[in-house]
Amino acid sequence: MNKKCIVGSALILLFGSQSAMAESGDVGIGAKAGTLGAGVEIMLGISDDLALRGGFNYIKFDFDSTLIDVDYTMEPEFKNLTMLLDWHPFSGAFRLTGGFSLNDNKVNLDGTVSRSLVPSEYGQFSYLTDLVRVQGSVDFNSFAPYAGLGWTSAYGESGWGVSCDFGVLFQGAAKVSDLNVVTGVDYGLFQGEVEAFLDEQEKEIQDELDKYEYYPVASIMVHYKF
């Protein structure tokens, strides 16, 4: 059984067993949106100043980046299963949060070689670069600690409310895998040059995506507490 199945089962058992004992305002469900995408969250108050939250987030987007004469379309796709513990000092609306996320976070890469790489004397053949693609993927740690702070309206009370969170997800450095050149011709005679080119690209891609190592988290949620 993988980590996500274990945590998912634990969440079901925990929230299921505790909900019967919970007082009004201690159990809730919410819909959220933020830098980790759209998601849902279940909340459970376990004392006057502590609460548990478990949820799932999903986001997919793309952006363009040029790295050493290769024009990439980078497509991050983030899936996060979160488990968080909130501490409300003085049982108030402000909270400090710690926890972790089980990630299935990746970035798909699809790049085309710039025509500027073709020497001017062979400019009439520059269109052939359109037949060459650089493809691969980038992964991050599957276990990512989280630390942050937030605010929630009407803490401990039943009914509708809103909350927000700000923090950092520590998901580790980008790891490039399966980077390769896709072309319709045999480049066996230039295997060494191609491998050196891919090594250089891998370093540039890692440098470009290292900004996701400490991923900023900001979200707003509408929730209902029973």
Image (cartoon, rainbow, N blue to C red):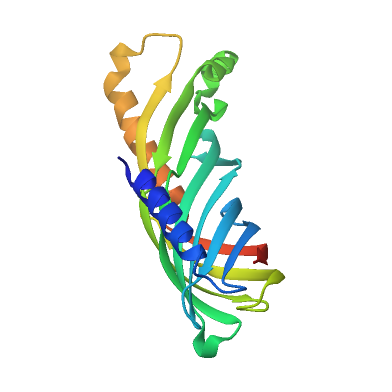
In the displayed structure, 173 sits above or below 155; it is above
In the displayed structure, 31 sits above or below 190; it is below
Tell me the quadrant of the picture where the N terminus can be found.
top left
> In the picture, residue 226 is in which quadrant?
bottom right
Q: Position of residue 90 (x, y in %)?
A: 52, 91
Residue at 45% x, 45% y is 105
Q: Position of residue 213 (x, y in %)?
A: 41, 56
In the displayed structure, 69 sits above or below 159; it is above
Which residue occupies the extreme right position in the image? Answer: 160
Residue at 60% x, 64% y is 28
Comparing 216 with 51, the one in front is: 51
Side of 122 where 6 appears, left or right: left
Side of 25 where 178 appears, left or right: left
Which residue occupies the extreme front position in the image? Answer: 20
In the displayed structure, 72 sits above or below 10; it is above
> In the picture, residue 23 is in which quadrant?
bottom right
Number of numbered callouts drawn: 0
Q: Position of residue 128 (x, y in %)?
A: 54, 14
Which residue occupies the extreme bottom position in the image? Answer: 90
Residue at 46% x, 9% y is 184
Q: Position of residue 194 (x, y in %)?
A: 34, 24
Side of 17 where 190 appears, left or right: left
Residue at 53% x, 79% y is 95
Comparing 155 with 100, the one in front is: 155
Comparing 72 with 157, the one in front is: 157
Comparing 71 with 115, the one in front is: 71
